[in-house]
Amino acid sequence: METASLPTKELRLHLVTWNVGTASPPPDVTSLLQLNSLGTSTDMYVIGLQEVNSKITTFLSDLAFDDPWSIFFMTVLSPLGYMKLSSVRMQGLLLLIFVKHVHLPFIRDIHTHYTRTGLYGYWGNKGGVGVRMSLFGHTICFMNCHLPAHMENTEQRLDDFEKILEMQFEGEGIPSPLDHEVLFWFGDLNFRIADYGIHFVRESINNKRFNLLWEKDQLNMAKKKEAFLKEFKEGPLLFKPTYKFDLYSEVYDTSEKKRKPAWTDRILWKVKNTCEESKEGEFPEEENPISISLTNYLSHMSYGISDHKPVTGTFKLEMKPLVSDPLVTLSAEGEWSAEHDVLIRYSAGRDFPSSAWDWIGLFQMNFRHVKDYVTYAWVEDDEIASNRDSKQVYMSGSEIPKMGGEFLLCYYSNNLQSIVGISEPFQIQPSQTPIEKDLPEEGSSWLQKPDNPDSGGNSERRKGI
């Protein structure tokens, strides 16, 4: 298929970086996520947090259950039609990615990794966490970093970032971060404003003459001389430096230390120019198959839970999709209710790497993540009919919600570790018999039947024992 012949697809990405200083989530993040201005036109939210509370008791609890920040953002975004696609945590570093349901079948090869750089690589208080994926066939990587603090540690920051860029995602043929078509780099990068004294810096800020400070910003200076940084782009710093503030205020540090303000919190990106690497005569005069444009780059001064202000970048991602059809299409057959067993019909592409461990989940419309299913069917064990074009799978009526409502079906591929097909929304009719079992209350979960996909059960039966 010729890339040039494909229509261009446009996606809107909203990135957040915020050093939350071990605080709990704020009451409201409407402006942070630009929910009023963007509504649900955003296709993907990428949220990078630093200094999430990682005291040992809290951290162990978060390993067993979702951390409060993840739960908070899921609570905000799931009713708007976003699912938590992936997350990765290393002590206080947390990276969350939410995506609209409609894009799920076109996001594949999701991998996460992290790199410790604190205490010579033995401690994870500093470093980077990354998520990479194939989005409509294009490779994209997101890296949330927390680099060393203090004015004098510029070289250490650069050394650490070079080490983080060497991150190796597990899996055959997975490119390094720099070899992805698009790489986003963001976080509390801790670069400071050199040379100028605190009074000149504060006076320049008060007079909104930020341009006087740009040439002494350590990251701007490093980008001019460090080869590995030169291809990274950043929007203009038209907002006040985001560090360091008194809590719950817009007043810069009044403590004894009186830290000099700095743009520590940044969002940068790099697009790999694949056209230059094409063989001579291949796609001549052709534009890059993927491009990024920055819509806005803002700080959010109203948030005061930490000594940093959050920063957001909204991007328009334009690409020629290399993947245009889902690997699996599926639908609910006939009328669904808890009065009887129900049927699902699905068909898979010829090259789809199916597995006996694949399953189809029934989800509420506002499901939070892939394990947030109401019930499920194993595609192999629960199959009842098959022909050349499609297969039928059943779900027991006893596991269908009696209260009814609007639901989705999602096909989960064990080999690809992702949702590869999603149905149109459909209605389940309320049960005519007295309701004994119903949908769980907010925050609770269903009792899973034995051998659920999360536990990987059924191992003995599948081995023929």
Image (cartoon, rainbow, N blue to C red):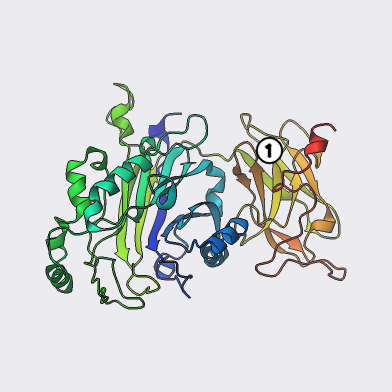
Q: Quadrant of the C terminus?
A: top right
Q: Is residue 397 above or below residue 326?
A: below
Q: Residue at x 67, y 56 (%)?
A: 363
Residue 284 in view of the camera: yes
Measured as percent of width and height from the top left, residue 49 is found at: 43, 59
Q: Nearer the viewer, residue 120 or 326?
A: 120
> Left or right: 343 with respect to 217?
right
Q: Is residue 182 above or below residue 45?
A: above
Task: Check disc 1 and give the amino acid type.
Answer: Ser
Q: Residue at x 86, y 60 (%)?
A: 339
Based on the displayed image, in which of its 4 quarters is residue 399 positioned?
Answer: bottom right
Farthest residue in the top direction? Answer: 280
Measured as percent of width and height from the top left, residue 9 is found at: 42, 45
Residue 321 in view of the camera: no
Q: Total number of numbered labels?
A: 1
Describe the element under mark 1 as helix, strand or loop.
Answer: strand
Farthest residue in the right direction? Answer: 433
Q: Rate crowding at label 1 as few (under 14), some (14 to 19) or many (20 or more) other CA atoms within 10 Å.
A: some
> Left or right: 226 with respect to 463?
left
Q: Residue at x 65, y 67 (%)?
A: 443
Q: Residue at x 41, y 47 (%)?
A: 142
Q: Nearer the viewer, residue 291 or 412?
A: 412
Q: Nearer the viewer, residue 393 or 140?
A: 140
Based on the displayed image, in which of its 4 quarters is residue 115 positioned?
Answer: top left
Measured as percent of width and height from the top left, residue 439 is found at: 74, 66
Measured as percent of width and height from the top left, residue 297 is found at: 30, 60
Task: Give the residue number, with chain letter if any, for mark 1.
Answer: 347
> Left or right: 395 with respect to 76?
right
Q: Is residue 403 above or below residue 362?
A: below
